[in-house]
Amino acid sequence: MEMFEGFLSRYDKKTTIAILVARYENRIICAEKDIDIFTYCARNRARSSEYNIILTDESNVYSDLINFIETHPLDSSNNNGGWGTREELNLIIRRIEMEIKEEVQRWREEMERENRELRNEIMRLQIEQVQIQKGNSALKRELLEMNRKMFIIWFLIR
């Protein structure tokens, strides 16, 4: 979180909302293990930060941002507490959602590429294993034949 706050240091603390978005898939995995996607320390740091930080996942960005805006007014105006008109906020949220979708798509493409590479490596190792097993079988036959010949020689010498 300190690095995140360091990044935010060049922006106005009062009017900037920072959103740290976790992948929805990670939230599901954590929920299955009955743990939160964000650590207690991260949540505590976000709450106590002098910056406006929202910790959320990609499926809750919109609702968490609206909730934040409604509960953290900049002023007493009817303009969403000074954050902007509903249309302005919707435009910003759509841009955020688009960026999240693009990042998720990049992540999925990278995961698919890594999966293909792993499958190829597994197939290569399986082929190598079969070749080693064939080599071991041939070596075993050769050793058995050598043992048989040695036994015959030993028997003839005695």
Image: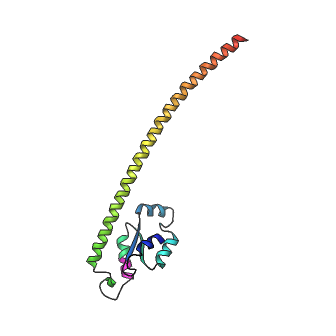
Q: Quadrant of residue 139?
A: top right
Q: Is residue 3 above or below residue 48?
A: above
In this picture, residue 140 sits left or right of residue 46: right
Q: Position of residue 158 (x, y in %)?
A: 73, 12
**Identity of the residue furthest to the bottom in this view:** 76
Q: Quadrant of residue 69?
A: bottom left
In this view, the residue in front, 5 or 36, is 5
**Identity of the residue furthest to the front in this view:** 10
Q: Position of residue 14 (x, y in %)?
A: 39, 82
In this picture, residue 108 sits left or right of residue 86: right
Q: What residue lies at 60% left-to-right and 23% top-to-bottom? A: 143
Residue 67 colored in magenta in the image: yes
Q: What residue lies at 39% left-to-right and 71% top-to-bottom? A: 19
Q: Main secondary structure of the magenta part?
A: helix
Q: Which residues are magenta?
A: 66-72
In this picture, residue 155 sits left or right of residue 126: right
Q: Is residue 120 above or below residue 158?
A: below
Q: Position of residue 157 (x, y in %)?
A: 71, 11
**Identity of the residue furthest to the left in this view:** 87
